[in-house]
Amino acid sequence: MPAEFITPEAVNFMVTHARGQLCMPMTADRLAELDIPMLPSRHSDSPFPTAFTMPVDYAIDTTTGISAQDRAATIQALIDPDARPEDFIQPGHLFPLRYQTGGVLVRPGHTEAIVDLCRLAGLYPAGVVCEIMNADGTMSRLPELEQFAATHDLKIFSIAQLIAHRRISESLISRVAEANLPTKYGVARIIGYRSSIDSGEHAALVVGDWKAGDEVLVRVHSECLTGDAFGSLKCDCGDQLDLAIRMIFEHGRGALVYLRQEGRGIGLHNKIKAYSLQDQGLDTIEANVALGFQPDERKYDLAVQIMRDLDITHARLVTNNPHKMAGISGLGIQVTDRVSLAVPPNETNEEYMRTKRDSMGHLLSSLQASPPNVSA
């Protein structure tokens, strides 16, 4: 519930029916203003541990701090711009939680979800959450939550839905710089982009001019330091990048969007770990999964936002990857055609390319059919 709408009745409903710990997600800036420190964290195996702070009680016109009236007063005071640090008792009974800047796009947790929802609604960026327990003390799962929502006339949605909404509806990139870039194929414009949700410095290489609605030849290329810069033979990334740039120049008009999504989104160091597993016999998918990742962790929302910034609404997409086509078209770009990147394999990467074709569905016309599995 948004903090500014809290009442003693709402607090009583949560602690009576939800039964879990009552907490109040809020921004780090507000916590700093009220001098509310973080609690030490130990032995958490979660990749997204909850950012608990020192619990507090409002010290003015309250009693023990635990009643519904007292906790509602504490919540109201925490968002009161006139409240001061000395107005709160530490420790108390209400746990503020520190929101991570960037919200669910950075940390897909309940803390970030409630603050993001409040901001989307134009409300003060703080809310009240309570985990839901069953009457027998076990945690409620989706079937019980659906029954709970039906009983109390509540809505259910997922954090994944909130993430998808923000990725589609918000502007997540901004232009930082642009310049002419002479290449071996001709002169292009290079434009640097900064994202508000990651530390990556993305870029676009632009050749020629167009207006919104024109079909534009586009390559969305994810960074591969080993292939793009070091000439690695383990993949076909460097060859794909070079061919795509040449194709755009030969066409006379187009754009290459370069995303910092090293190693299909797992990062350089994890990719090197995956290479080590491949040296031991795993294929590219098995290595990623062994490290705890999906076979492909890439997302294309930033690519779509860069394309929109470049007035690209209709794209002839240079790719062998149907999932990339679906991801980009699903975010609002009309993909009018797929243009194949026909890069021949070498002795080192042929098995890698077969895995991409056979297990990931890539359309690799440059590969011969896999030999039949003949048993003795």
Image (cartoon, helix red, strand yellow):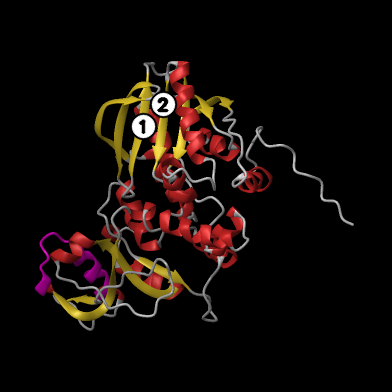
Residue 97 shown left or right of residue 338 in the figure: left
Sooner in the amino-acid sequence: mark 1 or mark 2: 1
Q: State if disc 2 and disc 1 touch (CB < 8 Å).
A: yes
Q: Residues within 10 Å of mark 2 (few under 14, many from 20)?
A: many
Nearer-the-camera pick, 356 or 102: 356
Nearer-the-camera pick, 274 or 280: 280
Q: Residues within 10 Å of mark 1 (few under 14, many from 20)?
A: many
Q: Which residue is mark 2?
A: 255
Q: Residue at x 46, y 40 (%)?
A: 300
Look at label 2 and name its amino acid. Answer: Ala
The percent position of residue 329, horizontal first and vertical second, equals: 52, 33
Provide the secondary structure element on which disc 1 rests.
strand
Quarter-wise, where is residue 189 in the image?
top left
Look at label 1 and name its amino acid. Answer: Ala
**Residues in magenta, as a range:** 70-86
Magenta stretch: helix, strand or loop mostly: helix
Q: Residue at x 28, y 60 (%)?
A: 3
Picture quarter with the C terminus:
bottom right
Nearer-the-camera pick, 318 or 184: 184
Q: Which residue is mark 1?
A: 204
Magenta stretch containing residue 313, yes or no? no
Above or below, 310 against 330 in this view is above
The percent position of residue 260, horizontal first and vertical second, equals: 39, 44
Q: Which residue is farthest bottom?
A: 64
Picture quarter with the N terminus:
bottom left
Provide the secondary structure element on which disc 2 rests.
strand
The percent position of residue 198, horizontal first and vertical second, equals: 33, 49
Do we see residue 289 in this rendering?
A: no
Residue 277 shown left or right of residue 206 in the figure: right
Quarter-wise, where is residue 190 in the image?
top left
